[in-house]
Amino acid sequence: MCGEVIATLKESQKPVLRKPMGSLHGDDVSVVESTRGCSQLVCVGDIITYRVLREGLVPKLSIVDGRSCRRAVSSEVLMGTQHPSFRTVELSNPSGTLTRELVLAVRDALTSPHRTRIFINGEEDLAVLPVVMLAPHTTGVLYGQPRKGYVVLRVRSNIKQKVGAILDTMVKMDPSDGIWRMLHGD
């Protein structure tokens, strides 16, 4: 089953998304230390989810796909992205796209009283975008920066504006779809 694609990334956007949108931390910096003051945590990626859980933090939302740098993660890492308090949602999201199912699952997870692990068949490469748009201010969004460490992006108005501009330039299947108003907080 493949999710309903609502937008695809333009090739010209890829360099913009390769740059960290938040503060970059090396692997030697504690996640606990780098996320002080965040009201809740969201992890996008297997390695960062594994690391956060190993450091004793349990994110509100974790989005994983069983891969890192387009290669399957070890069974230790995959098992290490699970936590007894997570409810798990499984969905499909092809590389370079956003699906309706992903956006709605992120919305539901962020408003649910439960902690959630979204497992994606496909790729979670763009999941940070709906997370930022739907997460409350002061949420810490963590994602990996290949071969450099991890990024902590603190959700604020200026970050939502930046991510909103990225979403606005994506190729939309139906620009009048109400999901875009929802993502922009309308």
Image (cartoon, grey):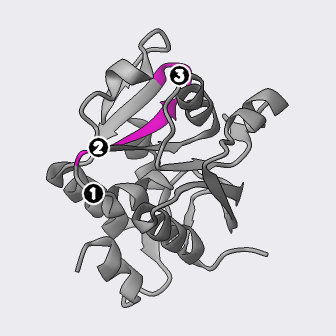
Q: Nearer the viewer, mark 2 or mark 1?
A: 2
Mark 2–mark 1 distance (CA, rounded to whole Å): 9 Å
Q: Is residue 103 above or below residue 79?
A: below
Are discs 2 and 1 less than 8 Å apart at CB? Answer: yes
- Dot 3 falls on a residue whose secondary structure is loop
At 67% from the left edge and 58% from the top edge, which residue is drawn? 88
Determine which residue is flagged by label 3: 55
Q: Residues within 10 Å of mark 1 (few under 14, many from 20)?
A: some
Q: Is residue 8 above or below residue 86?
A: below
Position in image of residue 10 (x %, y %): 47, 61
- Dot 2 falls on a residue whose secondary structure is loop
Q: Is residue 46 left or right of residue 44?
A: right
Label annotation for residue 144: none
Is the C terminus in the top left, top right, bottom left or bottom right quadrant?
bottom left
Determine which residue is flagged by label 2: 39
Residue type beneath disc 3: Glu
At 34% from the left edge and 55% from the top edge, which residue is drawn? 132
Label annotation for residue 136: 1
Position in image of residue 93 (x %, y %): 65, 64
Q: Nearer the viewer, residue 31 or 16?
A: 31
Which stretch did the figure color magenta?
138-149
Is the N terminus in the top left, top right, bottom left or bottom right quadrant?
bottom right
Position in image of residue 84 (x %, y %): 67, 45
Nearest to N terminus: mark 2 or mark 1? 2
Q: Is residue 12 left or right of residue 135?
A: right
Q: Is residue 143 magenta?
A: yes
